[in-house]
Amino acid sequence: MTSNPSPMLSLFKRLFPLKSGKRAFLLCGWLCLLTLCAQAGILKGKVTDEKGAGLAFATVYLQGSTVGSTTNEQGNYQFSVEPGQHTVVFQYVGYKTQTKTIDVPDEEKPTPLVLNAQLLPDVYNLNEVRVSLSGKNPAYGIMEQVIARRDYHLKEVQAYTAQVYVKGLQRLINVPKRVLGIMKVPAGLKPGILYLSESVSELNFMQPGKYRERMISSKVSGNSRAFSFNQASEFNVNFYQNLVKAKGVNERGFVSPLANNAMFFYKYELMGSSQNNGHLIHRIKVIPKRKSDPVVTGYLYIVDGSWRLQSLNLYVTKDQQIEFVDTLRITQQFTPAAGNVWVLQSQKFTFDVEGYGFKGNGYFTAVYSKYRVKPASFVKQAPVPTPVAPEIAAPAVSPPIVAAQPKAKPTRKERRAQRDAPPTNGVPDAEYFKKKEVLLIEQEANTRDSAYWAEMRPVPLTEEEVVDYHTKDSLQVIKESKPYKDSLDRKNNKFSVTGLLLSGYSYRNTFERTRFSIEPITRIWQYNTVEGLVANLRVGYTKQFEDRRSFYIAPTLRYGFSNEKAQAKLQGTYTYDLLKRRAVGFEGGRFVSQFNAAEPITPFVNTVYTLLFKENYEKLYQRNYLRLWHNRELVNGLAATFMVDYAQREMLFNTTDFVLRDRDSRVFTPNEPQNAEVASTAFPRHQALTAALSLSYRPGAEYISHPDRKINLGSKWPTFNLNYRKGIANVLGSDVNYDFVSLGVSDELQLGLVGTSDYSVSVGTFWRKKQLYFMDFRHFSGNRTILSGDFSGFQLLDYYRYSTQKTYIEAHYSHHFNGFILNKIPLIRKLKWQEVGSLNYLHTDAAGHYLEVGVGLEHLFKVFRVDFVTGFQERQKVSSGIRIGYGF
């Protein structure tokens, strides 16, 4: 068990280093003595409604502080309190606030205090309104005041530190036997609690919108080795912002009912006003003007005079184009803090989910306590009450007057240590936020015992949760045993023809952390005009170690029945450091390859088009080769891949013209790509030794640190890519001699209600081109089929016609409107289709200015996308077509 110092002891530790003279020293000593004598007690009880039923997620806290908790689904609460007299406040959205006074005795072994409360529905009286209005409904006058103060309330807290407890639960109510009637649901997935977790974090915030979090403890039901997905900073949904983002729920976000343009999206109705805990609270009903807009519905509770949120209860439904969630409800409760500001005390997200035969519900609740707040400079400081709550603010102590001493310039190591150190005075400073680690999960976070959680848990477990923890934690030893895992493997490893056709076959040994895999039939059996019918069998073997290191090895055997050639290759990867993202790998053998190694046309699509449409787009050559590579992260945000490749390369030729459906007007083209820069792409047998370096850099990249791995996130900057490839002559008989370099930039742009955009631009050139062959050219992601495997590339461009050995410029842009247009059309919006537009540009000496313009629909049947694309060359239309692929 890990002991935790009391708030008073923490206060003493913060004050003592100040060395503020004898008076301050005596004060600190007196506080220390009181701390050592005082023992925190436990306050617990139940909050019920007027009928005696438990009120789930009601707020309970000590007046004048942010010490408190929320009730669980059964209405029970508990939290630690220091000895002394306290006023306990009970709040629930829409109910009358109730206060009760208690005396917590100073005992060596305090007995838990039980304090129950029954809340009554608040009676909102329209006669209480005192707002001068010109509109039809007083609500508009109130909301005009609220919106006018929105930016003030958004920025009134310059920085804070808080302790955040998060609990998440997800239930399955119904589980189908198969998904879409095809894929079998894994054994062990049954109705009941699917996921239950708790976490305690220290959350640090600084304007504008910067968060740094340290997860102190984490618990996941049934898996003592796992870490919770509860990231406190992800739960900070702020309705003072114009656009409220909810990750994974709605791609466009929601217009806040407090936004500057809220009057365009919402109607408001004053339901009444009531005196509540010393404040006049207005209850405002929020009504969307158009259900198709990204809006919310529900109630706001506004504090008269300061025109701020006291609480809110809002929800969104399928009409607002949310994904995978039928209804999402958000409840927030605010409370005053030191410095004449209000802070978020608790919030709850409840949701219902239904899709693909699955049905379930769940919630995430977050409780904020132990705030240390730094108000913005424009906020007038409120008088600090006596005594000061230790978790809100520390008493000011004047430092002694001493002669100024010259300060030595800190070393780079000292500056880094200062930057990475957590706040020591309770409120983070600007230096602390320079580091890019947004979440640090402590090494021992998942080792806390039951006694720790009984003391730290501010929201009691419900009976269902107690049973789930007890059952799953008791079964964990059994589930980790070899017999149990073998029994699950026997069910999940059953062979299925349908599975082999669609996704291949996998055989797992969960206990040994190994897996064998075979590719789907569509890759095992292929057809092309070079080899004829092809048997291509690839078997993969993966081994994962307990510390997350892993290696993968995959032999591939291939035989062409027409050219009667047997081929084989072996590839392997060893990932040995997930903190520095380091891995090494190799690949070698005798095998065929497309001239564009990125495989612009898949073997399955080429098989279909060759046999049914007499189009042999796939162009192949022979390689006897060995490739070695290594990648790693050099510094945060900068990743590098080093590669060396040696190959003997030779041409291949068509050996068959068999088709299932003959087209007299078409003939197969030779296995020699046609290119606009060279008269012939044929080449003699030769050797090639190449070395390549690829750098990817995203400035300001943020990341999450797990004890055993690092997870990279994004930043406000785009990603820059530098690629350099050199053909090395006269080494190992190599015949190539050239240099190629390219520079690229890419990013995703969040454009609010209008949607999101993706773009990429790259420029490249060859120099010192003494000798290179067609496979060394810069190739582009062309497509000549109706199927598109990648909508980020060209959709109509020939695969090899404009491949170049000269300078090129390539650019791609796509914009996802996320329903901005279609959700305004009745009936159509129920389909949840989303519109998308794209532009693809290429410039080479041979292609000139080539442009593709596309418009399309995505999320068709939730997973498909269809585009209509038109191509222009030097402003003249050259082609058009429909492209179908995944658009999820």
Image (spheres, rainbow, N blue to C red):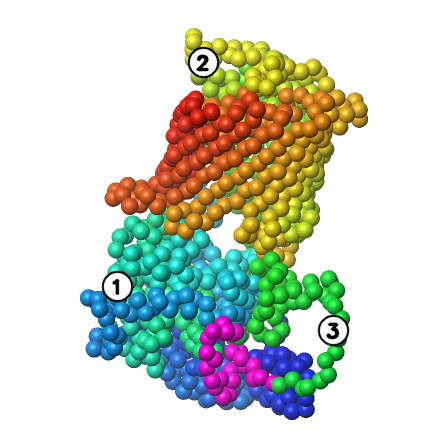
* Amino acid type, residue under disc 3 in the picture: Lys
Q: Circle 1 sits on which residue? A: 268
Few, some or many residues within 10 Å of mark 1 (<14, 14–19, 20+)? many
Residue under label 2? 660
Residue at 28% x, 41% y is: 828
**Which-is-in-front pick, marks 3 and 1?**
3
Residue holding disc 3: 407
Q: Residue at x 54, y 38 (%)?
A: 761
* Magenta-highlighted residues: 373-397
Where's residue 152, x and y in %? 42, 69
Q: Are marks 2 and 3 in contact (CB under 8 Å)?
A: no
Q: Quadrant of the N terminus?
A: bottom right
In this rendered view, identify the residue nearer to me: 493 or 675: 675
Residue 227 vs residue 827: left or right? Answer: right
Closer to the camera in the image, 387 or 220:
387
Q: Amino acid at mark 2?
A: Leu
**Which is nearer the N-term, disc 2 or disc 1?**
1
Any magenta on residue 376? yes
Asked whether residue 293 appears in the rendered view, the answer is yes
Residue 718: percent from left, percent from top: 55, 47
Image coords of residue 398 (percent x, y)? 62, 86
